Amino acid sequence: MAVTKIHKTSRIVMYITMAITIVVMALFFLGGEVPVDQRLVPTAPEPKYIDLLMYWVYFLVGCTVLVLLAFAIADFISSLKNQPKKAINSLLVIVAFAAMFVITYMLGSDKPLDIVGYTGPDNVPGRLKMTDMFMYSMYIMLALAVLAMIFSPLLKRKSNNK
């Protein structure tokens, strides 16, 4: 009963998220452009709902990170009581992610960008390094996900043959 309720709830959340995403994307692509006198750069086209799209993406990424951390912590606490060795493995995954973030932050560039028409506060070394950290981390996680999709069935098949 509880599993069915979890599946139903997660399916409803997924459909709501997809519906909001479709509406936001439709507004972004079909919502028109900012009038020329209100644009950041008058000669460059600027979609009217770009702020809405960016805030929606920030919200989705924030929720994803919070849920990931909550499940990782809950799994660690649960495993620590029942299977301490498994708990150490969970902790090692969290430590590996933290190490990846530190390394990719250090690899990031702190050179200010030459952005036409931008005078905001975000073109500073700390923000630029953090942005590079996020991009490099996404590249690494995407590569790991693709490798896992390729090699996971092979490893499973090999272990079934033994």
Image: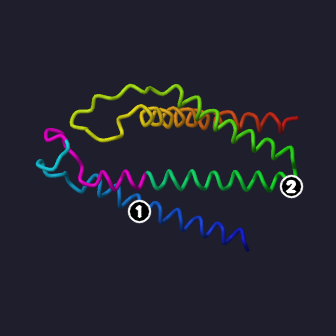
* In the image: residue 155, left or right of residue 62: right
Residue 111: where, in percent of width, then height? Answer: 38, 25
User: What's the magenta region?
Assistant: 41-57
Q: Is residue 49 magenta?
A: yes
Location of residue 114 by image quarter: top left
Residue 154, how many percent across, how many down? 73, 34
Q: Quadrant of residue 159?
A: top right
Residue 45, compared with residue 20, is above or below; it is above
| Quadrant in which the N terminus appears | bottom right
Residue 148 shown in magenta:
no
Residue reaching furthest to the left: 37
What number of labels is visible?
Answer: 2
For badge 1, the amino acid type reads Ile
- Name the residue beneath numbered marker 2: 81
Label 1 CA crowd tier, 10 Å (few <14, some 14–19, many 20+) = few
Mark closer to the chain start, 1 or 2: 1
The quadrant in which the C terminus is found is top right
Q: Secondary structure at mark 1?
A: helix
In the image, what residue occupies the spot 61% across and 33% down? Answer: 100
Q: Which residue is mark 1?
A: 20
Left or right: 73 in relation to 63:
right
The location of residue 104, given as percent across then percent down, is: 55, 30
| Front-lying residue, 103 or 124 | 124
- Between circles 1 and 2, the one closer to the viewer is 2
Q: Is 65 or 121 nearer to us in this picture?
A: 121
Q: Residue at x 38, y 34 (%)?
A: 124
